Image (cartoon, helix red, strand yellow):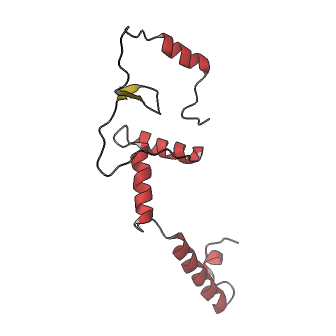
Amino acid sequence: MSKRTAKTLEQVQRENDAYELPDKLDLTKLRRTGRNGRLLPQPPVEPGKIRITIRIDEDIYDWFGEQADKHEGRVGYQTLLNNALREYIEGKAPKFEGTLRRIIREELQATAKGPGKSRSFRLGRR
């Protein structure tokens, strides 16, 4: 279970016991939020958006959640995740393969010039 959503059964029961519900309550127009369990009105359908369910690693979820928390509620983790995917698709994300190839080329050229010329030796790394 994710460290961001883990609650003991006792905590959940205490929270539920603290609220008294009226006799008649229409829950059809409400949804339960994933982060804190509050009931909120269903958001309006945004044009161009679809609702999906995906499984992602907990550390990925936690990282995006922490980034959203740093924005103090101005940006949600789903927005950040969507933006990261869009940057990757549009080619704005760093090209690791190109960077790695450039570094290898530089190291090979420096090594071909003779010992002690490679960047790793100049920087004191072995």
In terms of depth relative to the viewer, which is nearer, 50 or 17? 50
- Residue 88, given in percent of the width and then of the height, sits at 45, 63
- For the N terminus, the image quarter is top right
Left or right: 25 with respect to 63? left
Left or right: 103 with respect to 33? right
Q: Residue furthest bottom?
A: 113
Q: Quadrant of residue 58?
A: top right
Give the vertical position of 85 relative to 3 (above or below).
below
Q: Residue at x 30, y 45 (%)?
A: 46
Left or right: 121 with respect to 83? right
- Residue 44, given in percent of the width and then of the height, sits at 29, 38
Q: Residue at x 60, y 88 (%)?
A: 109
Give the vertical position of 12 relative to 89 (above or below).
above
Left or right: 114 with respect to 5? right
- Residue 50, given in percent of the width and then of the height, sits at 38, 48
Q: Residue at x 61, y 73 (%)?
A: 123
In terms of depth relative to the viewer, which is nearer, 93 or 23? 23
- Residue 62, given in percent of the width and then of the height, sits at 53, 42
In terms of depth relative to the viewer, which is nearer, 52 or 71? 52
Give the vertical position of 14 relative to 46 (above or below).
above
Q: Quadrant of residue 67?
A: top left
Q: Residue at x 41, y 62 (%)?
A: 87
